Image (cartoon, grey):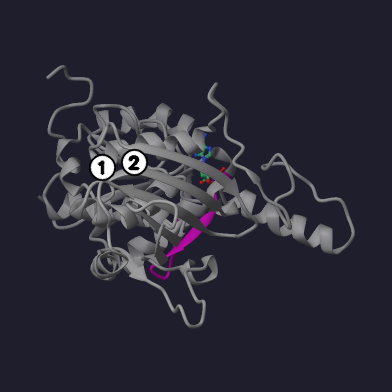
Amino acid sequence: MPESYRVAILGATGAVGTELLELLENRNFPLSELKLLASPRSAGRTLPFKGEQLLVEPVGEGSFENVDIVLASAGGSTSKQWAHKAVAAGAVVIDNSSAFRMDSQVPLVVPEVNPEAAANHRGIIANPNCTTILMSVAVWPLHKVQPVQRIVAATYQSASGAGARAMEEMKEQAQAILDGKTPKTEIFPYPLAFNLFPHNSPLNDQGYCEEEMKMVNETRKIFGAPALRVSATCVRVPVLRAHSEAINLEFGQPFSVAKAREILSEAPGVELVEDWQANYFPMPFEATGRDDVLVGRIRQDISHPCGLELWLSGDQIRKGAALNAVQIAELLVAKNLLKPAVALGANS
Ligand code: A2P
């Protein structure tokens, strides 16, 4: 295998795309070439990388020739349009959209949880939903020691989950409200500044929104636990870029708080943040820009002898999206997994 790789970022101008650029630079990913792709709207724009300005190209036929790895973060329809073409051109696609996550032929990978799943890829590997990644990193180390039977989560999701334009919209709304004006809404259905609302993804006939069902189905797939009971309430809150989650875990037997704390203090990708004297626990402000998921407020559930409560904050753009994707790319390189095990669409 070559020692450096030709990488393309599809959606390079977006919130996750720009973070991907920064991570590839700061983590010194072995690159021989970097291609920045976005929509025709961004043609001619440049983005900084390693002291140079790289030109953004509109994605098109031929964009994926001579590319080893595509990091895609341009939305589900764009991924559906281009991912198979990129694979046909010889690239492995690490896709941040929801387009392929539940496809049984596509591994859904959180490197701290199920790195082995990456080996079965057929050209596409899916990056899970941000809230699911953050929850998985915190819950998996406990689940490995004693299987969790039921997870009940409530999320506090930042504007960044809806993209760079949504973050700008929230800032403009805050300014408008402070100026006594009516806030404008284009990306979000309602004003987010000084407000919150249940996640506005489509609702199913049981009353769960798509985001909540992603937490249910993707966690089951990542954990390899199809019967795991998961329920979630997802809420958008006026925070710029880190998500928080309140998580209730039910085990088959009591799980001591001391043991949970010990496990999480050593778990990869987790930083335990707890100062009970100072009432100091994970906060989105402090999670912003950090690689680790901050976990704390671990306590016995007073309503259930086998229950634990915990609280986390994690950078949605970083571990919730871009960092997880770059870690998958690093895993493919380290384990020599760039060649698909079986071509996508093959029957075996
Ligand atoms: P562009 O900036 O040209 O619109 P975010 O999630 O922050 O909103 O970013 C979405 C990213 O996906 C941007 O880089 C955006 O590019 C890109 N994108 C959106 N639609 C398309 C498309 N049809 N083809 C290629 N890139 C797209």
**Left or right relative to 70: residue 294:** right
Q: Secondary structure at mark 2?
A: helix
Are circles 1 and 2 on residues that touch, CB within 8 Å?
yes
Taking the image as shown, residue 285 lies to the left or right of residue 80, namely: right
Residue 285 on image: x %, y %: 54, 69
| Label total for image | 2
Residue 63: percent from the left, percent from the top?
37, 37
Q: Between 143 and 136, which is closer to the camera in this rendering? A: 143
Does 228 appear in magenta? Answer: no
Q: Is mark 2 within 8 Å of ligand 1?
A: no
Residue at the image point whose x is 39% and y is 54% from the top:
134
| Mark 1, residue position | 223
**Quadrant, the C terminus:** top left
Q: Please provide the residue range marked out in magenta.
A: 42-54
| Other residues around mark 2 within 10 Å, as few (<14) / some (14–19) / many (≥20) | many
Q: Which of the 4 image quadrants contains residue 54?
A: bottom left
Q: Please tell me whether mark 1 sits on a helix, a strand or a loop.
A: helix
Which numbered disc covers residue 219? 2
**Residue 51 in magenta stretch:** yes
Who's the residue at 32% across and 52% down the image? 306
Which label was assigned to residue 3? none
Disc 1 marks which amino acid? Phe
Q: CA distance from mark 1 to mark 2?
A: 6 Å
Q: Position of residue 193 (x, y in %)?
A: 72, 56
